[in-house]
């Protein structure tokens, strides 16, 4: 029987791990570094994997830590400047803060979750977020960090943190509306 | 306190990250009662979280 070694099984995960890291870090070099560190750590920890069923899930767990480390380092090295322009919400709201164009309820959102095309649209919308906005949002939504931790990791004020999360959610909802729900 | 839609959506986002104060949630409730657009967004933001979870579950295979 042909059996892959542990190293080969890990190596086979590299493209997936790279895609995952790129989504969070938005920087090819940083993503490759995080994946490399993950593979090295995973090889060293082979005994820790023994008995667990899913190598991919296990390796992703290690990669998550490496990603947060990378974001922490980047936050220390270059404090965040604001990516958005002054009037970033001008297209959404008028001068008095009312909708320019009133959002409507989305038809069958639960059905969308079952659709591969919808998840692909979501991926495109995530990729379209500005890099730091995306990082803050994924730390919150996917890594499950509290906002206080996110501000600390990214080296930004708590006000700025709230703005990033707000911006990410409004941009994603608009992108999904345009690319999926209002087709 | 009368919220604008911009302020109301800001609170809707904040609500995903921390509990609102009593004053914030009262003001938001009043605004949502009269604003269809913000009611739509109020349902969409929690949906984003579920969609993201589904997306990452799929990615992990």
Image: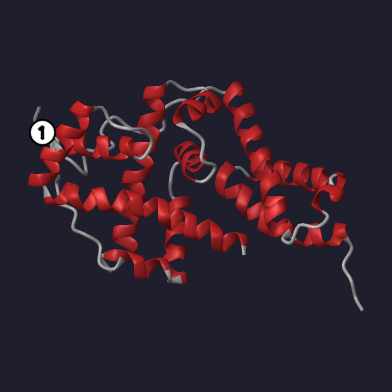
Comparing B1 with A133, the one in front is: B1
Give left or right: position of A41 versus A147.
right
Q: What residue appears at the point 47 percent right and 44 percent down from the top-left corner?
A: A141
Residue underneath mark 1: A96
Q: Position of residue A136 (x, y in %)?
A: 48, 36
Are there few (<14), some (14-19), or many (20+) residues within 10 Å of tag 1? Answer: few
Q: Which residue lies at the image location 38% right of the left edge and 52% below the top edge?
A: B48
Q: Is residue A26 visible?
A: no
Residue A20 visible? The answer is: yes
What's the colour scheme? secondary structure
Q: Quadrant of residue A65?
A: top right
Report the residue at 83% width, 55% height from top: A50
Image coords of residue B40 (percent x, y): 21, 53
Q: Is residue A110 above or below residue A104?
A: below
Q: Is residue A77 left or right of residue A90?
A: right
In the rendered image, the quadrant that contains the C terminus of chain A is bottom left
Q: Is residue B21 above or below residue A97?
A: above
Q: SS at mark 1? A: loop
């Amino acid at each position: 029987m042909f059996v892959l070694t542990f190293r080969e099984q890990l190596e086979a995960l590299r493209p997936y791990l790279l895609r995952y890291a790129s989504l969070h870090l938005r920087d090819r070099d940083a993503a490759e570094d995080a994946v490399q560190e993950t593979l090295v750590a995973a090889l060293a920890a082979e005994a820790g994997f023994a008995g667990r069923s899913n190598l991919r899930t296990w390796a992703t767990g290690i990669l998550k830590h490496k990603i947060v480390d990378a974001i922490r380092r980047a936050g220390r090295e270059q404090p965040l400047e604001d990516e958005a322009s002054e009037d970033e919400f001008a297209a959404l709201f008028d001068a008095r803060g009312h909708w320019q164009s009133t959002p409507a309820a989305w038809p069958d959102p639960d059905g969308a979750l079952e659709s591969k095309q919808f998840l692909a649209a979501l991926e495109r919308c995530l990729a379209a977020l500005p890099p730091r906005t995306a990082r803050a949002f994924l730390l919150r939504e996917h890594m499950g960090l509290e906002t206080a931790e996110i501000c600390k990791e990214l080296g930004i004020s708590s006000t700025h943190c709230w703005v990033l999360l707000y911006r990410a959610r409004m941009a994603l909802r608009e992108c999904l509306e345009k690319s999926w729900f209002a087709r | 306190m009368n919220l604008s839609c911009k302020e109301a959506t800001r609170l809707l986002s904040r609500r995903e990250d921390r509990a609102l104060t009593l004053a914030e949630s009262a003001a938001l409730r009043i605004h949502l009662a009269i604003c269809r657009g913000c009611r739509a967004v109020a349902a969409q933001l929690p949906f984003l979280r579920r969609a993201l979870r589904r997306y990452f579950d799929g990615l992990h295979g």
